[in-house]
């Protein structure tokens, strides 16, 4: 008959369930049944129900438990081979095949041993000896599993700079062995939680449910953040304990958490959802590139099984031999396009913003994203790549392209009226719009001074479909796989008359991300759609534009229009750049129901090989809030 075996991960100290006793049959088939029963019992690491020659089952179980007590993190399946006759008619031998599975690596350690069965009083009984578990064991030795953790692959940036690498941290928590009662544990837990700014109720509950000998971690702090703690308050908390460690981290906490993701110890949920590929104690990537490329960055865990001398308490002593060893395979590094210095510069420039904000910049020549930074008020959300904002007047670049395709030129005349009413909705220019730029004006002036009415007055010239196609020609709605999620904008193909009018000036139903607008600026600079790239050599699918590309001739005219914004419009501060060749567009997009409405502040700009987009969710005019920040960023990028 074919036995059915079960696997059970080794859980030392767990309750032991009895198995069926060995068959009392005196025939060879009885010996086979006994061997199969023994194999099943060893698979469950529970031999209490077995019969042994001159040995109590409880003593055999204690010996087995002692041998494997240091194999936590592994499970075993034991199978019995064919039974053969021994030295006499009442003796049999049976080969046992041991197949251990190490949870941390899902790799197997397999070997064979031999068991001896004797028939005593018409029942086949096992001769218990340590070599039944492994041939090299003695009565004073046991097995020890040691995990070999791989080194996680680094994330490198432009110029091979180390973006994510091992950096020092301090683990802060409570040592419950130093806390005598629940009242003191609760008091210390809440005091520590308040000091390090974690949820006090949750941490108090975690401490309460932890083992009496456990260190209960409250937070892991970067070394520099730990030094900023009030040490007097920390030291005054009973039971507080700190431990130095290192973790794969970016240069600073706000560097690019949305892009990079994080690395931490596997949670119960991670283990449960991993289909056996992750075990407790392992480090795993979560979110961003760390999560997407876990297999590449994480490497493969290895292990060693040692035969060790056992101390009187069963703990491992000195190593006798290593019958099995599998070396860990370190994770492979990956290279991304972020420029570490410019990314940090952008983070610093946005530090004073009290609403979500972002800077995205890429190289016009290659599409490499060199900056994708979010302000602190974004609170971890990727404003740079995922925000969906109305672009305001920065969208007059795609609208201008639509007009150029209707045979307009920068010198063509447009009507910049004081206001225009569309189906009962009145549109006006900004309150700061110069009076001498009203009336019949060249398109170049309408762009430089950002005349809303001039573009809305051409609503019959440029259809909503024309506008959508022009936006697509500059990269909007492109399909991209950056290794992380990104929103490349949306422009509806049809709209009501009022909403179409609003769309022409970047309002209505037009939505974009800073990344999408940086691509618009880059495409206008290059004369073809620039495809953004974040991860190098990752085998990701190349970006797919949603429409036909802008042409080189169209781009030259767009550049001339955008240059006027630097010479005569809201981006005059960019004249400080050397060489003085920058061009771009400011934008202010109204949102919400406040009166006056709140506004998104936008800038897109190009200087030499850098195209950038900047947004502040709740800002002033783009020329006021955005232009100074754009200038400082482009100065750094040009240095």
Image (cartoon, rainbow, N blue to C red):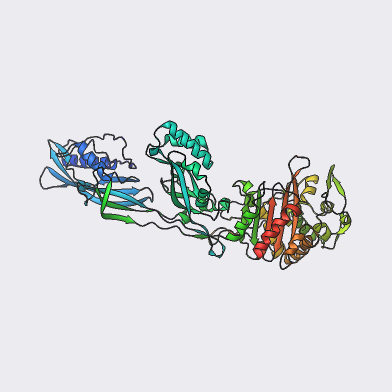
Q: Residue furthest front?
A: 232
Q: Residue furthest bottom?
A: 579
Could you say which is closer to the camera, residue 384 or residue 554? 384
Please identify the quadrant where the C terminus is shown.
bottom right
Could you say which is closer to the camera, residue 569 or residue 169? 169
Position of 99 relative to 545 (above/below): above
Could you say which is closer to the camera, residue 320 or residue 499? 320
Coordinates of residue 612 in the picture (x, y in percent):
68, 58
Residue 517 sits in quarter: bottom right
Position of 185 relative to 536 (above/below): above
Give me the residue at 42% from left, 31% from top: 182
Q: Residue furthest top?
A: 183
Coordinates of residue 102 in the picture (x, y in percent):
35, 49
Position of 589 relative to 405 (above/below): above
For the image, the number of numbered tags is: 0
Position of 184 relative to 348 (above/below): above
In the shown orientation, is residue 281 left or right of residue 78?
Answer: right
In the shown orientation, is residue 496 left or right of residue 159?
Answer: right
Q: Is residue 267 visible?
A: no
Q: Is residue 20 visible?
A: yes
Coordinates of residue 197 in the picture (x, y in percent):
54, 41
Please identify the quadrant where the N terminus is shown.
top left
Coordinates of residue 51 in the picture (x, y in percent):
19, 37
């Amino acid at each position: 008959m074919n036995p059915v075996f079960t696997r059970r991960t080794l859980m030392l100290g767990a309750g032991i369930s009895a198995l069926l006793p060995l068959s009392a049959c005196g025939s060879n088939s009885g010996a086979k049944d006994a061997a199969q029963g023994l194999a099943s019992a060893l698979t469950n690491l529970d031999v209490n129900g077995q019969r042994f020659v001159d040995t109590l089952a409880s003593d055999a179980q204690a010996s087995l438990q002692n041998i494997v007590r240091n194999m936590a993190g592994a499970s075993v399946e034991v199978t019995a081979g064919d039974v053969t006759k021994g030295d006499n008619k009442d003796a049999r031998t049976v080969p046992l095949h041991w197949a251990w599975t190490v949870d941390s690596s899902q790799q197997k350690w397999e070997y064979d041993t031999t068991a001896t069965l004797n028939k005593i009083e018409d029942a086949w009984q096992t001769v218990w000896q340590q070599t039944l578990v492994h041939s090299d064991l003695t009565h004073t030795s046991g097995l020890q599993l040691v995990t070999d953790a791989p080194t996680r692959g680094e994330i490198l940036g432009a110029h091979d700079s180390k973006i994510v690498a091992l950096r020092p941290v301090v683990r802060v928590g409570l040592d419950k062995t130093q806390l005598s009662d629940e009242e003191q544990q609760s008091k210390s837990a809440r005091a520590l939680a308040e000091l390090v700014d974690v949820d006090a109720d949750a941490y108090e509950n975690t401490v309460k449910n932890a083992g009496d000998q456990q260190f209960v971690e409250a937070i892991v702090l970067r070394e520099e953040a730990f030094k900023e703690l009030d040490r007097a308050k920390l030291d005054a908390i009973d039971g507080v304990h700190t431990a130095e460690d290192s973790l794969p981290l970016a240069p600073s906490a706000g560097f690019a958490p949305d892009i990079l993701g994080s690395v931490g110890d596997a949670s119960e949920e991670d283990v449960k959802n991993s289909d056996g590929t992750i075990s407790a104690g392992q480090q795993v990537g979560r979110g961003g590139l760390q999560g997407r490329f876990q297999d590449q960055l994480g490497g493969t865990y290895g292990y060693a099984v040692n035969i060790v001398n056992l101390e009187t308490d069963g703990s491992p002593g000195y190593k006798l031999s290593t019958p099995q060893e599998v070396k860990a395979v370190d994770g492979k590094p990956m290279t991304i396009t972020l420029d570490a210095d410019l990314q940090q510069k952008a983070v610093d420039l946005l530090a004073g913003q009290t609403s979500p904000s972002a800077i995205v910049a890429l190289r016009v020549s290659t599409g490499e994203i060199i900056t994708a930074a979010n302000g602190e008020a974004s609170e971890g959300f990727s404003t740079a790549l995922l925000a969906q904002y109305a672009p305001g007047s920065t969208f007059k670049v795609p609208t201008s392209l639509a007009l150029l395709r209707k045979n307009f030129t920068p010198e063509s005349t447009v009507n910049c009226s004081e206001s225009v009413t569309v189906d009962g909705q009145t549109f006006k220019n900004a309150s700061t719009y110069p009076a001498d730029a009203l009336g019949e004006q060249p398109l170049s002036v309408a762009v430089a001074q950002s005349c809303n009415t001039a573009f809305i007055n051409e609503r019959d010239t440029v259809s909503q479909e024309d506008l959508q196609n022009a936006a697509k020609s500059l990269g909007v709605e492109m399909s991209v796989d950056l290794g992380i999620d990104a929103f490349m904008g949306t422009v509806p193909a049809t709209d009501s008359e009022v909403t179409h009018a609003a769309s022409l000036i970047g309002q209505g139903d037009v939505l974009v991300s800073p990344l999408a607008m940086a691509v618009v600026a880059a495409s206008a600079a290059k004369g073809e759609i620039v495809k953004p790239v974040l991860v190098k050599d990752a085998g990701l699918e190349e970006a797919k534009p949603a429409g036909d590309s802008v042409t080189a001739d169209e781009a030259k005219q767009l550049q001339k229009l955008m240059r006027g914004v630097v010479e005569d419009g809201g981006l005059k501060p960019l004249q400080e750049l050397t060489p003085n060749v920058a061009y771009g567009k400011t934008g202010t997009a109204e949102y919400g129901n406040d009166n006056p409405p709140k506004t998104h502040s936008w800038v897109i700009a190009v200087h030499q090989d850098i195209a950038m987009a900047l947004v502040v969710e709740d800002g002033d005019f783009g020329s006021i809030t955005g232009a100074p920040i754009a200038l400082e960023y482009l100065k750094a990028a040009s240095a």
